[in-house]
Image (cartoon, coloured by chain):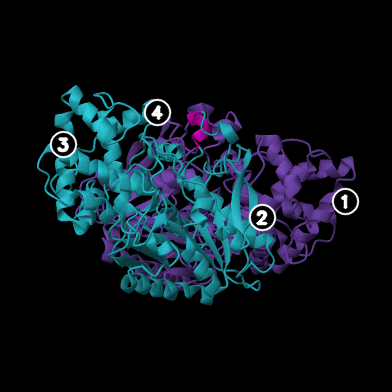
Chain colours: A cyan, B purple
Amino acid sequence: MTPEEKLDFETFYFAQPVDHFDATYTATFKQRYLVSTKYWNKNGGPIFMYTGNEGDVVWFLRNTGFMFKMAAKFQAMMVFAEHRYYGKSLPFGSQSYKDPLKLSFLTSEQALADYAKLIGHIKSTVSGARNSSVVAFGGSYGGMLSAWFRMKYAGVVDGSISASAPIWQFTGLSLCNGPYKVITDTFKKASVQCAKNIRASWDVIDKMSNSEAGFKFMTDEFKLCFPLNSSNIMDFKNWLSETWFDLAMIDYPYPANFLQPLPAWPVKQTCLSLNTTFSNDAALISGLAKALQVYYNYTGQISCFSLSSSGPLGTLGWFYQSCTEMVMPFCTNGITDMFQPSSWNFTKYSLACYQAWKVYPRKNWIKTNYGGKNIESASNIVFSNGLLDPWSAGSVLRNISDSLVAVIMPEGAHHLDLRSSNPADPQSEVVEKRIILVTLLRFQEYHG
Amino acid sequence: MTPEEKLDFETFYFAQPVDHFDATYTATFKQRYLVSTKYWNKNGGPIFMYTGNEGDVVWFLRNTGFMFKMAAKFQAMMVFAEHRYYGKSLPFGSQSYKDPLKLSFLTSEQALADYAKLIGHIKSTVSGARNSSVVAFGGSYGGMLSAWFRMKYAGVVDGSISASAPIWQFTGLSLCNGPYKVITDTFKKASVQCAKNIRASWDVIDKMSNSEAGFKFMTDEFKLCFPLNSSNIMDFKNWLSETWFDLAMIDYPYPANFLQPLPAWPVKQTCLSLNTTFSNDAALISGLAKALQVYYNYTGQISCFSLSSSGPLGTLGWFYQSCTEMVMPFCTNGITDMFQPSSWNFTKYSLACYQAWKVYPRKNWIKTNYGGKNIESASNIVFSNGLLDPWSAGSVLRNISDSLVAVIMPEGAHHLDLRSSNPADPQSEVVEKRIILVTLLRFQEYHG
């Protein structure tokens, strides 16, 4: 039984204006949302709404067990709202991604307006909900949205649980190499030698890329479905980087299937084959290849790797968003991190965006629109972060006020706290964090 | 010397995106703004920004003397930012009003985004302004914008002076007859008999409209430039209603030239010829006609009246805005007010909007977007109101929290407090109000 069946979730669709900010544009689309009233106190119990991020909302529902637990505790209605342009909430159906003009309504502002109107719709149509307090839940981009939702629509939402939300990983707000330093620290924690080997691997790959034999060796060792060559070696290295990124991000203390089916503490597992001093380059490549098997072939069902991944996230939509509003500068230096040095080049980034979407990014807009570091006048937001998670580098890690609270899980990965609790959770931190969350959630009692 | 000359205001233009919420739309336009650094402490003194409303911003500058005084006191830079689609800030030049598609960027959200970006521009280009605190000033619609600016862009603006801002004169937030009750009370205060005669006048006009002779009599008495008849009598009555509305709104205690050149306490002056019991209908009409001379012909230069007024406000732009976002329900009952009973008919209103602009109003959007009555989590806003002013009916008249403060001037008209101080100001109230404002403004010292 899936969680949505177990918790009696029903699926609904709500007609939203395609453009909330232009009355001359009258088209609407159907936004999907799932509702469970299993735990709800129909006499004004609170509404907990997950502000969906870049993917099918059902997938977020299945990875947000904490919200179920809290809903049971607070007798809350649960709503999982899907983000426009993802899952089944496509403003122009199968044509939604056809051209930039059709995509122009894919913005965080429009998504927040969707959520605000949806709350209004629920309150005005569900008997007993009119005066319910509303708490937004979200992780990652969904966590940014839950925080911004409270900042921008404080009259609609009373507070937010914003998990692993890098609201400061934007131009001018954080160092561009922050996330890569965190990844490196997470790997070092598992094995200093492992991080050292990964740092060394880039030069080895480059050296091997000088000969056909080297390409052939790497193609075989890494079990690729295609031959490596000088035109795709860069893609391959990026794929490696992304793999280390993802591994640190989802370094959960128990077997989980978030982006991939993985064992407990996957960074440690990955590092098992890199926790040694290699006597030569070929041995290092072999070690690296074995390490990758943990991430990409834990179930042993894959015979060869292509670089494409078709995960649950809407990567195409996010690519567009990162080319318009969500401009997150990234860089590496090879010193505080284990990656090949690479600087942030906005001009190049911008041109790539133009090539792909015929748009240029508005790199400062998120800071202007959502306040950047000046958010101290907001209230009732819990920013939680696990320090193993690269996204923690651009997140809120200190209390800003009595009601803008930072919760840190030193041993936690990407929104570990939103997941169902597990005996393997690093108890001290997660439990403490949950207590704080619950305490904060009590504000709903005064409003409800 | 005009105030802008006296205070060394310089005029600038800033390139704003026509559409802040769509990166695929790359056109920009020049927003006008005026800056004075006459009083500014160039070492981080605060920025006081007037958030322009529906008209030429220079006109607002000339009617906002309070801001000059406060700027002198707080060593503040003064910025008067013009609202898009008004004055010289026309996104499509002379074509801006040509069709609804060109007007589709005329929204309060776009205007607020303009103001936010403009602050960023000033802070990043004017040496010494980088860490300046920002206080927004505004009256009427400009006051709604200054309040909403703080609510939506709390990271950009530290506090707002929101004068006579009817943020609650929207669907579902206030009674539709509230403003007309206030007008009636304002007239009653000047003369109970005057209000009684105005209430009686509608039936008299209707009765006279039954005959050619009646129309002829009224045309002559009211000194109209055109003959009254059954097809324009409704417009004439609306014009009368608007006149009473405007008179109450600008019932200042000294001669002023806001919408019209007027004597001190114009309601009282108007009522001088209506402060009696008329022996017959013709006498009442004559009294009414004399009363109107106060408003429309105080300078005695007009030989006949047409109903059209070409004032400083952008009535066409506001018509569009009221047909999209700014849906303010109005009605009269003839019992608690002195007007002819008229109910609020949204369907009719909506159809008129469609006829004029090919748009249907989004009547609940302002409430959803700006929080309606649920604004208690905002901070640092002073809502000031004069109780003579019809707009006070839809405004914030009570303290909501320690930093959402309501200031009442029982003898004040429409944003009297924003005007230069005058010996005739009702001292007790205005002085007290200013003290409170100044106290609140002190928060800038902690930020500045």
Determine which residue is flagged by label 3: A282
User: Which of the pair B146/A286 is nearer the observer?
Assistant: A286
The amino acid type, in three-letter code, at marker 2 is: Trp
Q: Chain for mark 1?
A: B
The amino acid at mark 1 is Lys
- The front one of B65 and B99 is B99
Horizontal arrangement in the rendering, residue B193 relative to residue A155 (left or right): right
**Residue B207: mark:** 1
Q: Nearer the viewer, mark 1 or mark 3?
A: 3
Above or below: residue A367 compared with residue B180: above
Q: Residue B23 versus residue B370: which sits nearer the camera?
A: B23
Label 1 neighbour load within 10 Å: few <14, some 14-19, many 20+: few
Please tell me if label 1 and label 3 are on a single chain. no
- Disc 2 to disc 3, how far (Cα)? 91 Å
- The residue identified by callout 2 is B244
- Which residue was labeled with disc 4? A356
| Disc 2 to disc 4, C-alpha distance | 59 Å
Indicate which disc residue A254 carries: none
- The amino acid type found where label 3 is placed reads Ala
Q: Give the range drawn in magenta.
A: A99-104
User: Residue B288: x percent and y percent?
Assistant: 73, 53
The picture places residue A395, in percent across and down from the top left corner, at 31, 56
Q: How many marks?
A: 4
